[in-house]
Amino acid sequence: MRHEIIIVGRGGQGILFMGYILGLAASKFMGYSVVSYQSYSAETRGGRTRCELIISDEEDIIDDIRVSEAEYAIIMYDGGLEKIRGYTKVFYNSGLVAVSALPEECEKIGVPATRIALEEFGSTIPANMVMLGAFALTRIVTLESLAGAVREVSRSEWADMNIKALNIGFKFMKSLSLIHI
């Protein structure tokens, strides 16, 4: 099993945190090998941010640290979409990304992560965890492994909110009956 995943957005959306949580969940809590690569612009907020992960059940996956044929993309903001091509399944933040901006050839899975975060928490901050919870329905990692990773790295005052956001995102996806993901 090998999964290549790319996460893109802008600075301030927690893209690198999403990648770290996903990688930690896969490696420490699922026992997979993980390679991760991050890139971001010089701006503290608003610049392009990207995280690439390769998750595998093989021990030696370090043939390349960059994703070459991503199976999944998680798009939190549509800046930089000109480089998003050829992905099989794209999870996109439907409040900030227009479906028309996405590649035609991929399966598009819209998650209103920002709207859900605002409604549930009164803030857009946990939108990244809502999206990651929705992504858990792929079964690459479990919701429990994501929660374990969040609990390990989040300050205690943020952990409960982040885990609640994961659960809300997961329940949202289950309500769509997208079991074929």
Image: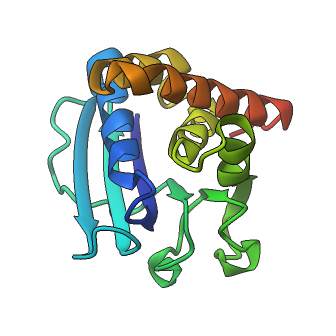
User: Residue 30: in sight, yes or no?
Assistant: no
In the rendered image, which quarter contains the C terminus?
A: top right
Q: Residue at x 64, y 31 (%)?
A: 137
Q: How many marks?
A: 0
Q: Residue at x 84, y 38 (%)?
A: 176
User: Residue 175: in sight, yes or no?
Assistant: yes
In the rendered image, which quarter contains the N terminus?
A: top left
Above or below: residue 69 compared with residue 156:
below
Closest to the observer, 4 or 148: 148
Q: Position of residue 108 (x, y in %)?
A: 71, 60
Above or below: residue 41 compared with residue 30:
below
Judge from the rendering whether residue 87 lies leftward or rightward of residue 103; answer left or right. left
Q: Residue at x 66, y 67 (%)?
A: 96
Judge from the rendering whether residue 155 lies leftward or rightward of residue 60; answer left or right. right
Judge from the rendering whether residue 29 lies leftward or rightward of residue 59; answer left or right. right
Q: Position of residue 163 (x, y in %)?
A: 52, 23
Q: Residue at x 32, y 46 (%)?
A: 54
Q: Position of residue 23 (x, y in %)?
A: 32, 36
Closest to the observer, 145 or 168: 168
Residue placed furthest toward the bottom: 82
Quarter of the rendering containing residue 2? top left
Above or below: residue 27 compared with residue 114:
above
